[in-house]
Image: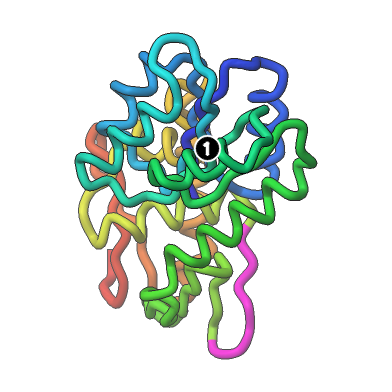
Amino acid sequence: MRITLVEDNASLAKGICYRLEDAGHAVDMLDTGTAAEVFLRDDGADLIILDINLPGVDGLTLLKGLRARGDVRPVILLTARAETADRVIGLDAGADDYLIKPFEMAELEARVRALLRRRDVPQQQMREVGDLYYDAVARQLFAGDVEVVLPRREMSVFECLLGADGRLVSKGAVLDHVYGVGADVEDKVVEVYISRLRRRLSAHGIQIKTQRGLGYQLSAGQSE
């Protein structure tokens, strides 16, 4: 899944980012409310982790803006404010969860999992693609009753292509989905993941078509 993190404490932000990436998520990091206000209008995140005390626009104002324009993505607020009244204000502003600093990373991960599960409740049916079935909640692929294990990065590439519903996905979009926007990673790594993923999926009736200079397209049941 893709997560947007807005936190101005650099060491905390890096710690959260590393932990979430280890869990298989792509993370976009921002450190000011002003930058986040622009970014959150067009990003494709599944979940937002938002500090309240930010330079520029504060987190509560950002959250109210999201809800005012109909953005219903789950939001976890991070704050050092421990009073009940502060939690009530945050939840009334539209937060789905509230985590008080300092906190254990394991607790943050658990809350992320819970919110993502809640978001995916209407889509818990497995999705059929080729000869495989994909469980978006568990992030697992199955051939019958047997799990088809994909390395973490390849699973992220697969999810990106599958989510496009047959549309062409640019190399840059795949890279952003896997590593987060602005990550210092050469786009050639996408070619490596695509090549490996293509070999793994071809036996199950799934093809990844390449249109040079344009991107990639996932298809099933057709020869390349």
Question: 147 and 72: which one is in front?
Answer: 72
Which portion, as a residue range, is magenta?
Answer: 144-150
Point 38% across, 69% down: residue: 206
Q: Is residue 52 left or right of residue 83?
A: left
Q: Identify the image quadrant of the C terminus.
A: bottom left
Q: Is mark 1 on a helix, strand or loop?
A: strand
Count of numbered tags:
1
Question: 13 and 72: which one is in front?
Answer: 72
Point 55% across, 79% down: residue: 142
Q: Position of residue 161 (x, y in %)?
A: 36, 54
Q: Position of residue 221 (x, y in %)?
A: 29, 77
Q: In this view, does 66 lie to the left or right of 160?
A: left
Displayed quadrant of residue 81: top right
Q: Is residue 94 left or right of residue 1?
A: left
Residue carrying label 1: 49
Q: Position of residue 70 (x, y in %)?
A: 22, 47
Point 44% across, 35% down: residue: 175
As drawn, 45 above or below 116: above
Residue 71 is covered by the magenta coloring: no
In the image as oriented, which residue stretches furthest toward the top?
56
How was the colour assigned to the protein in this rendering? rainbow
Question: 221 and 35: which one is in front?
Answer: 35
**One can see residue 2 in this view:** no
As drawn, 5 above or below 135: above
Q: Residues within 10 Å of mark 1 (few under 14, many from 20)?
A: many
Displayed quadrant of residue 211: top left
**One can see residue 95 in this view:** yes
Give the residue type that dot 1 points to. Answer: Ile
